[in-house]
Every structure is written in C-alpha cells, then in structure tokens.
Image: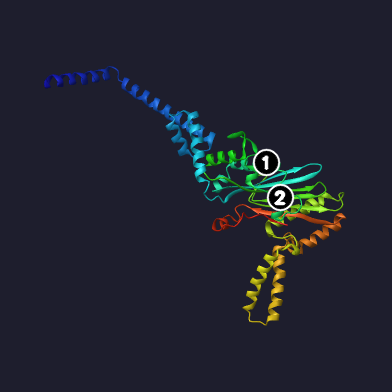
Amino acid sequence: MAFSAVTKRSRSIGAILFNARLFPNSTCRSRSRRFTTETSSASNQTNLIKQLRERTSAPIKDVKAALLESNWDIEAAQTELRKRGKVLASKKSARTATEGFLALALSHTPTHNRAALIELNCETDFVARNDIFQHLALSLAKQALLVESGTQAQLGFGAGGFHVGPETLEELKLNLEHPKISGETTVHNAITEVAAMMGENVKLRRGFVMSTSSNSVLSTYLHASPQPGLGRIAGVLTLEVEDGNSQLDDLQRVGSELAMHIVAAKPLFLTKELVSSDALESEREILKSQAETSGKPQMAIEKMVEGRLRKYFEDVVLMEQKFVMNDTINVKTLLNNLSKEVGSPVKIGNFFRMEVGEGIQRLEESTASEPVAQAV
C-alpha cells in the first residue's frame, strides 16, 4: 500500500512537471490573474475608504472599521458611522471645549442695523479650522440675527443690546448648505451631527445681538479671522449722532477704528460713572494695601491711592483710554473732535468685546455664572 501511494504521488508530480514543460506560461498566468484580482480588490477598497472619508469627514480608522463591519457596503457603513458618532458625541459632551471661533452676522435695513455674534467651541484648533465647523458657526450667527428678544437688563446692556443663550436657539430650525451636511434641522441636532463627524465635543456657548437705528452706525472688528465673519476676538459698538443728516462716512471710519481699539485695549466700562461700586471698592483696597507698604504717612498714602485710581480708570474705562491709533489723545477727545467734524454731538451708545474661551477655566474651578462680554 505504501509503495502504491508513493507511485501515485510520483505520477501526480510527474504530470504537473509534464504540463509545466508543455505549457510553460500557464502557472504564470494563474498567478498573474490572482495578483490582478487582489490588486483590483485593494484598489476598490481604497476608493471606498476615500469616498466615505470625503462624505463624513470621520477619522480614517473609524471609516475603515465601519466598512469592514458592513462588508464594504458604503451606504451601510455611512449609516453606522452616523449612529456611532452620535453616541460618542453625547459621551464627549462633558469634555472641555476651549477652542473654536466667534461668528458674526450683520443685517442692514432702512430702519435699523443689527449684529449677531455667537461663540462655537470645540476641543482642538484642528477641528476649528475644518470648513464644516466654520459653516455651522456662520449658520448659527445668521440664525441668532433673527432672534427678536433676549436677556437684557441683568447683563447691563443699553438699549438695543441683549444676550442670546443656547437655550434660546437650540430648538430653532437651521438650514445647512454644506456639501457634507445639508438640509433643514434643529440647531441642537446640527451641533450633535457636527460633533459626531468631528469626533470632538462641539458646544454653542453664548451669543449677543446688538441693534441700532438707521441714523446710527454699527461697527465691528474681528481679530485672527480665517474668513469673513469668523474670528477669535470681536469688538462691536454703536455710534449715535443727534443729526441724522451727518456725514456717515466719517462715523463709519471712526467706528471701525474704535472697534479695533476695543479688541486691543479691553475696556470694561464706558465711563467712570458706570464703574461698579464693587469693582471700585475692590481696586481701592488693593491700591491701599500696596501704598501702605511704602511706610509713608496716611495723607500721602491717600494721595497715592487717588493717583493710582486715575490710572485704573485709564486702563478699564473706554472714554478714558488712550486711543490705540493715536496715543496722544484719549477716546473722549477723539469723539469730541469727531463731533466738531460732523457738526453734531457723537456718542458711543453701546459696546462689547468677546474672546474665544475666555472664562472657561474659571468656570470649571468654581460655580460662577457664565461670563459675559464687556459691555456698557
């Protein structure tokens, strides 16, 4: 039996060798067909990975995993990614998000001018630079522009300025027009969808709306702006003039310069009279403690405190600050000169400054309320 088995095996090997001699290219052709098939399959898979990545902007490792689990069915894989992404987005919602952008939207009508500014946060600058994230931010600002009322009195805004919180916007309809995320949805669902796509916590933190009459000028400035309507720091103000027929071009020029000044100089109050008693008393106590270390008499200490308080006003009060574009005058003098130029008194009606991520760290360390933009 053993001899018979060996003989059969020898004949089989001999047949293979004989066929190989008669048809020398058959083995090569077989290997070539198998290699071509494998290469074609790998190319198709790479193509599917690329397509799904372009559709969803999901991380490439998640794209590969979804396609493998869906047996390379791209539609099923996309559905799976969206389900998985939303679950992960809800888990990541507690993670700190200090990056992002401010988005600004403007509206000009015959009766009024309006500006809406929102802050949309994420975890990393990488996601903030993504065009889907930026499209969402700009869409949210346009939506905030349509809000008619909000919290005004408790934030210290003057007439025409109010706060728009996330709770005001979340259930409103939003129409997205980005190639990778489009259609009508709610603000809340749009944020969740983008968070799922980006793989990070995405959060609408706050918003502000400011309006003024058509006879006034509303000026804005965005710093560190990657595209129109987006920036990391914003300054917004209104200039009011008694004579509606005044030279609006001059008002707009100075208004733009003052918006830049607000971003650079960080004013907290419009006038000395508007400095809160708590802020003034706190600063006075700090200055008094510093002056007492000099060992000088009490009368001298009081003079030192008053002199340093004047410097404090120059630091935090907009009207007392040195104008950043010409430090030989302060903002009060700038407005007086402008009033003479246009032939009618000009005043600042309202202003605020906002910066991405400001106050978030302090919020995490305490139970303090949400920080607000510096305003009159």
Q: Amino acid at mark 2?
A: Phe
Q: Secondary structure at mark 1?
A: helix
Residue at 69 percent across and 74 percent down: it is 305
At horizontal 49% and vertical 40% (from top left) the residue drawn is 87
Q: Residues within 10 Å of mark 2 (few under 14, many from 20)?
A: many
User: Is residue 29 positioned above or below 255 on the image?
Assistant: above
Q: Position of residue 252 (x, y in %)?
A: 78, 50
Residue 176 percent across, percent down from the top left: 63, 36
Secondary structure state at the residue bearing disc 2? strand
> Can I make out residue 347 in this image?
yes
Tally of marks:
2
Q: Is residue 34 left or right of residue 283?
A: left
Q: Out of 178 and 209, give the one closest to the viewer.
A: 209
Give me the residue at 63% from left, 45% from top.
Answer: 167
Which mark is on residue 143? 1
Name the residue that disc number 2 marks.
162
The quadrant in which the C terminus is found is bottom right
Name the side, left or right, on which 34 lies relative to 303.
Answer: left
Residue 327 in sight in this render: no
Looking at the rendering, in which quadrant would you find the N terminus?
Answer: top left
Decide: is 207 above or below 66. Answer: below
Corner quadrant of residue 373? bottom right
| Horizontal side, residue 357 vs residue 305: left or right | left
Residue type beneath disc 1: Gln
Residue 172 position in % (x across, y down): 65, 39
